[in-house]
Image (spheres, rainbow, N blue to C red):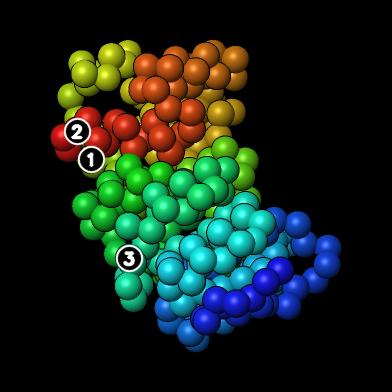
Amino acid sequence: MTANAANTEAVPHPPTQTINVWLVEDNQIYRGALARLLNQASGLRCSSAFGSCGDALRQLREDHPPEVILLDIGLPGLSGLDGIQQFKSLSPTTHVIILTVFEDADKIVRAICAGASGYLLKTSPGDKIAQAIHEVLGGGAPMTPQIARSVLNIFARMATPAPELGLSQREKETIEFLVQGLTTKEIADRLSLSIHTVDTHLRNIYRKLHVNSRAGAVGKAMQAKFA
């Protein structure tokens, strides 16, 4: 790959790893430590690490996009929150997972509405971060327990069901489980439904909200709440 971004770091990795991950983090010590950890994790390959959104965006315009970008919020220049939409615009299939010290509701809502597929705190153990990458590629929406509680509190304040969204009570329950990062099978178990029925609920939610992803559905529901 080309490496002409000023603060781009090519990270050595074993050849057997498959999921390509980029890391955008301005703390050099944390960036290096996390990159090494990811390259030691099964099935992961941290091919590049950047100190800013600007560097990562320049590289994304020239290189093959990664499957996942781990993105800090408090970055020099363009913030992570403002960078999410630009990353998604350049590579719609790339999943963006926020990795930050911030856990306030406003930043969580903004990140999810912008298209983030997950939201983790930097205090998360390394194995949990690696697990979250696998989860998001499996259709999940990983969040640390603190973040999940914050988002569920937001949903608790929403009207039931939100008339402007046109969702049924069962569909709203399904979105709440999406927020927690549950898989389709786990949602089916919680609601005592078949996987086929949950898939039907998901298709109906996507159709009603005019989205095509779990993160999009959660973001649309939050936008309706805070509009």
Q: Residue 115 appears in which quarter of the rendering?
A: top left
Where is the N terminus found, in terms of image quarters? bottom right
User: Would you say residue 193 is visible in this rendering?
Assistant: no
Relative to 153, residue 73 above or below: below
In whole angstroms, how far apart are the C-alphas of marks 2 and 3? Answer: 24 Å
Residue visible at 27% across and 19% down in the picture = 165
Residue at the disc numbered 1: 154
In whole angstroms, how far apart are the C-alphas of marks 2 and 1? Answer: 9 Å
Q: Residue 11 appears in which quarter of the rendering?
A: bottom right
Residue visible at 49% across and 18% down in the picture = 203
Q: Secondary structure at mark 2?
A: helix
Q: Which mark is residue 180?
A: none
Q: Which mark is residue 79?
A: 3
Relative to 8, residue 183 above or below: above
Of the numbered discs 2 and 3, the one sitting upstream in the chain is 3
- Judge from the rendering whether residue 128 lies leftward or rightward of residue 84; answer left or right: right
Where is the C terminus found, in terms of image quarters? top left
Q: Residue 14 appears in which quarter of the rendering?
A: bottom right
Residue at the disc numbered 2: 225
Residue visible at 23% across and 42% down in the picture = 153
Residue visible at 65% across and 68% down in the picture = 46
Name, please, the residue furthest toward the right: 16
